[in-house]
Amino acid sequence: MPWFNSILNTVADKYGFRKIDASERDRLRHREASEILKFLGIPLWKLPAIMAHVRTLMQDIDPSVRLFDGIPEALARLKAGGLRLAVVSSNSIENVRRVLGAETAALFDDFECGTDLFGKSAKIDRLLRQHGTAPERFLLVGDEMRDIDAARKAGVRVGSVAWGYNHVEALRERGPDELFLTVADLPSTLA
């Protein structure tokens, strides 16, 4: 998130949408994606270009940007516990793999990347069909209200993490099936 916050106003200059300050950034963490787009003045037709630009900027991301503390170990415990892991992201697979690092990326069985901002449910459906997985055996873990919406649309369970984009109270109000307050909660709840 610090990296995203550092580029947001530069991207706003390039694409002509509203710049925000730190207090507005915090308030936006309580809003869903469509409300954020409206607040920033981003029409939907501009969104693909903006997302492509941000993905390109991410290719040059500072190497000090890394996963939250404990994530590689938590994922390794989940994998060792016999879970199938997949990444479903609107980011490019190259960016996802680079931030994960080779060792952590190797823990994942599937990568469904490059979806549009609101296209995760279709990627979930594809994973379910591809693996013959019953929806009740699938849990999407995400950090945004739109992840909860995508899981509901795909008919799967959803868990929200408290350390990501949307504020934990906004996520709680949306009613995920699971709420993970710390990284350690992931393997202790799911393994």
Image (cartoon, rainbow, N blue to C red):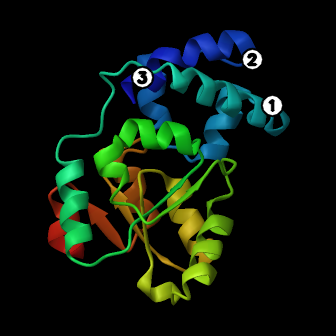
Q: CA distance from mark 3 to mark 2?
A: 18 Å
124 to 114, vertically: above or below? below
The earlier-in-sequence mark between 1 and 3 is: 3
* Residue 25, x across and y down, in percent: 46, 26
- Image quadrant of residue 77? bottom left
Closer to viewer: mark 3 or mark 2: 3
Q: Secondary structure at mark 3?
A: helix
Disc number at residue 15? Answer: 2
Label tally? 3
Identity of the residue drawn at 62% across and 25% down:
56
Residue of label 1: 46
Could you tell me which residue is drawn at 14 percent across and 70 percent down? 188
Give the mark nearest the N terminus, 3 or 2: 3
Where is residue 104? Give x, y as percent: 30, 50
Quote the CA–CA distance across marks 1 and 3. 22 Å
Q: Residue at x 39, y 36 (%)?
A: 99
> Is mark 2 in CB contact (under 8 Å) with mark 1?
yes
Quadrant of the frame with the N terminus = top left
Pointer 3 residue: 3
Q: Decide: is 94 above or below 147.
A: above
| Type of amino acid under label 1 | Lys
